[in-house]
């Protein structure tokens, strides 16, 4: 009886030591949950979630400090994915969050631009090219449509233009929506 | 007799082939205007080489293949390039596409051209010529032929698809009746390229005349004409391979994975015209049928408007109400008669309420599993419908949504009239779009991380410069002080010569600091969670 107890407690201790050792030895750098959440967020980096970018919002969600319904660019689909990942219930957008908009890109009116570089400083993905006192241009494929460059422009020469549909971005409609449209 | 196999499911829709298959084909006269989309094939659009106002000859290259997966476009007749502009095409989106508009001059004057001895050419060169002649699969998929054959050497089986299983369509049937010998010459070129152990032609048993013609043309060539039972969709690539060889193409795989290459009989004909006569792909045979006076097959130049072909088939009857481009099972409904015929158009059906009554409203799924019984891809259509309808895309994908060939057999038998295929198309395009969004997000994440790093580095640089300035100022002060009280015996101490070892050490410290910043920017959560 005593021997059995001893053997069992020895095994328990040994396994515990192995576990403890591997926890230290194979510790994962960073926080994998944050990365998983960040992978769902659209990376627009717009700050509409009230955090200074997607990663900080992901960090706050992981820490349980923010709800999952704060990212308008992600749309309801994004909330649904976050709910799935975190095993939570789907919740609609809150009253204080902006409504999702169609994806747009910023366009600079190059005749009005005075080359002040304020928009360059605001762009979170370095998608604006230009130098001091020179006309600026937006690299459309890299623009995330975050709108952060619009407000700082002192001459209001930046507008957000919704992306036109092309054959590359065209999608089949949800059949029930298509029927509703045909009916009248 | 070859032992035939069967694929799962299949249906027997009303054939409606006799309307058009008995008439000999007709060559269309020159149309008023030709509209040539730059993208008539799978892959990237061809790149236009001409400008508005250019005079071109018949067979002249108008747009070259661009990138790995693409095909060239040629002038179907001589004339003037009227414009290169956006024009409506037969695409479910209804979005216009970039097209070359050609005004024929009525002379139909050929560019100098001639056939060549393909056996004298290296294989690569022959494939390049196929690409430059704009040859694509003419069964409807329009996959560039030179890409399909690129890695196909010493294969087991070459299959020629003459099944033509979709109702109403009879172009392959007519082509085989009228051009059997030329198709066989094209098949010989395919055999030369792919060196197959066996070559088979699969034809459904509802085309006795075509079967006889092909058997006669193939006599003594080692090509075997295999008559298969009529069952939709036996002309689907995977289904035909299963019937003829008993082998299954793995999910997500290509026929080449199991040593098979499958090509349409019309493609073989186009290859023959190109190699033995030097003619690029500028025309094709197309069935014009349905609610028209005299349904028939017409050899039309690529770019001819639908309206002119309908006129050649005797014109649409009174109660016509639109067109189907392709067959009734997989084709596309359109209303614009000015849309051009493209390389992949095999059929135009003029519609009427009598021939194609509008489907009754859809009812809820009763889980009768009739769709499961007929699905040739052995899927669970009712489950796929359920997931697609709930927009549960991940689940739909894990039920092999992408194995669905959109044949429409499930919708055809569904007693609840559910437009099942529409749900599958919706789900597939949603998944592709998500994939694109994900790529864009990854790019934005990378750029944002770089942006943070850049700002941090700039800050650091500024701070360093400031520190250096201060240090320099201090040193200057100290130097001034020592000069006030000169101690000639120790001149070196006040301004030590830069020692290479110390310099690299400070650099190393700076690099370490930068590395730490990068790490922190890449994983800021450690700091943020504490806040
Ligand atoms: S609201 Fe903007 S910053 Fe916040 S997670 Fe969404 S895209 Fe990122
Ligand atoms: S055939 Fe229609 S009703 Fe029957 S199980 Fe399939 S989807 Fe449901
Ligand atoms: S459309 Fe797709 S799911 Fe329906 S029967 Fe054909 S392959 Fe199966």
Image (tube, coloured by chain):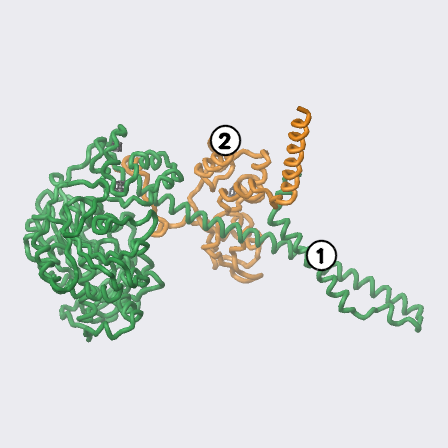
The residue located at (19%, 74%) in the rendering is B114
Give the chain of mark 1. B
Q: Nearer the viewer, mark 1 or mark 2?
A: 2
The residue located at (52%, 61%) in the rendering is A135
Provide the secondary structure element on which disc 2 rests: loop
Q: Which image quarter: residue B147?
A: bottom left
Query: Percent x, y for residue B104?
Result: 17, 66
Residue A160 horizontal side relative to residue B452, left or right: left
* Quadrant placement of the C terminus of chain B: top right
Give the chain of mark 2. A
Relative to residue B361, is residue B42 depicted above or below? Answer: below
Few, some or many residues within 10 Å of mark 2 (<14, 14–19, 20+): few
Relative to residue A156, is residue B370 depicted above or below? Answer: above
| Nearest the eye: B418 or B53 | B418
Q: Which chain is orange?
A: A
Provide the secondary structure element on which disc 1 rests: helix
Q: Are marks 1 and 2 in contact (CB under 8 Å)?
A: no
Q: Residue furthest top?
A: A1
Residue B309 horizontal side relative to residue A60, left or right: left
Badge 1 is on which residue? Answer: B463
Query: Percent x, y for residue B129?
Result: 27, 69
Q: Which image quarter: residue B144?
A: bottom left
Look at the image and tell me whether residue B85 can be seen. no
Badge 2 is on which residue? Answer: A88
Q: Does the closest atom of ligand 1 sit within 8 Å of the Cβ of label 1?
A: no
Q: Which image quarter: residue B311?
A: bottom left
Q: Which chain is green?
A: B
Few, some or many residues within 10 Å of mark 1 (<14, 14–19, 20+): few
């Amino acid at each position: 009886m005593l021997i059995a107890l001893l053997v069992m407690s020895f095994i328990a201790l040994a396994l515990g030591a192995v576990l403890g050792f591997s926890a230290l030895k194979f510790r994962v750098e960073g926080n994998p949950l944050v990365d998983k959440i960040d992978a769902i967020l659209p990376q627009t980096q717009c700050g509409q979630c009230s955090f200074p970018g997607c990663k900080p919002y992901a960090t706050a969600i992981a820490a349980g400090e923010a709800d999952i319904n704060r990212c308008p660019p992600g749309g309801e689909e994004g909330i649904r994915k976050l709910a799935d990942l975190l095993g939570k219930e789907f919740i609609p957008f809150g009253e204080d969050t902006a409504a999702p908009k169609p994806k747009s890109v910023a366009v600079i009116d190059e005749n009005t631009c005075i080359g002040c570089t304020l928009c360059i400083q605001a762009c979170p993905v370095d998608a604006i090219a230009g130098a001091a006192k020179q006309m600026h241009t937006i690299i459309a494929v890299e623009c995330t449509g975050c709108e952060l460059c619009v407000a700082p422009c002192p001459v209001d020469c930046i507008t957000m233009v919704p992306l036109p549909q092309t054959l590359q971005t065209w999608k089949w409609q949800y059949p029930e929506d298509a029927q509703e449209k045909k009916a009248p | 007799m070859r032992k035939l196999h069967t694929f799962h499911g299949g249906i027997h829709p009303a054939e409606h082939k006799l309307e058009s298959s008995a008439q000999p084909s007709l060559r269309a006269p020159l149309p008023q205007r030709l509209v040539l989309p730059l993208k008539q094939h799978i892959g990237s659009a061809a790149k236009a080489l001409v400008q508005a106002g250019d005079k071109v000859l018949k067979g002249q290259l108008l747009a070259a293949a661009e990138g790995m997966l693409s095909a060239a476009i040629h002038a179907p007749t001589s004339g003037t390039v009227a414009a290169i502009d956006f024009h409506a095409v037969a695409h479910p989106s209804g979005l216009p596409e970039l097209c070359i508009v050609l005004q024929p001059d009525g002379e139909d004057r050929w560019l100098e051209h001639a056939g060549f001895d393909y056996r004298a050419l290296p294989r690569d060169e022959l494939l390049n010529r196929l690409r430059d002649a704009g040859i694509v699969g003419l069964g409807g998929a329009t996959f560039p032929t030179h890409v399909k054959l690129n890695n196909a050497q010493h294969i087991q089986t070459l299959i020629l698809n003459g099944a033509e299983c979709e109702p109403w369509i009879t172009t392959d049937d007519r082509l085989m009746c009228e051009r059997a010998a030329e198709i066989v010459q094209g098949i010989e070129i395919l055999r030369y390229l792919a060196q197959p152990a066996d070559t088979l032609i699969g034809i459904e048993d509802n085309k006795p005349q075509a079967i006889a013609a092909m058997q006669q043309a193939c006599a003594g060539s080692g090509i075997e004409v295999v008559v298969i039972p009529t069952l939709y969709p036996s002309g689907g690539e995977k289904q035909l391979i299963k019937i003829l060889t008993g082998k299954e193409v793995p999910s997500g795989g290509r026929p080449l994975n199991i040593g098979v290459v499958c090509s349409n009989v019309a493609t073989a004909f186009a290859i023959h015209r190109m190699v033995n006569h030097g003619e690029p792909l500028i025309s094709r045979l197309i069935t014009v049928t349905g609610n028209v006076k005299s349904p028939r097959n017409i050899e039309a130049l690529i770019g001819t408007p639908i309206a002119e072909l309908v006129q050649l088939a005797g014109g649409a009857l009174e109660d016509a109400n639109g067109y189907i481009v392709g067959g009734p099972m997989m084709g596309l409904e359109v209303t614009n008669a000015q849309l051009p015929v493209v390389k992949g158009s095999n059929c135009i059906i003029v519609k009427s309420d009598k021939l194609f009554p509008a489907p009754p409203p859809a009812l809820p799924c009763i889980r009768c599993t009739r769709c499961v019984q007929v699905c040739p891809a052995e899927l669970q259509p009712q489950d796929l419908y359920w997931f697609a309808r709930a927009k549960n895309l991940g689940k739909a994908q894990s039920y092999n949504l992408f194995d669905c060939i959109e044949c429409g057999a499930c919708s055809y038998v569904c007693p609840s009239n559910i437009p099942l295929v529409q749900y599958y198309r919706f789900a597939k395009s949603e998944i592709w779009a998500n994939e694109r969004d994900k790529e864009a997000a990854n790019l934005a994440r990378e750029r944002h991380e770089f942006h943070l790093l850049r700002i941090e580095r700039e800050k650091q640089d500024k701070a360093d410069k400031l520190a250096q300035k201060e240090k320099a100022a201090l040193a200057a002060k100290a130097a001034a002080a020592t000069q006030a009280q000169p101690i000639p015996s120790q001149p070196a101490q006040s301004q030590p010569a830069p020692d290479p070892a110390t310099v690299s050490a400070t650099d190393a410290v700076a690099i370490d600091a930068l590395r730490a910043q990068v790490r922190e920017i890449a994983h800021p959560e450690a700091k943020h969670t504490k806040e």
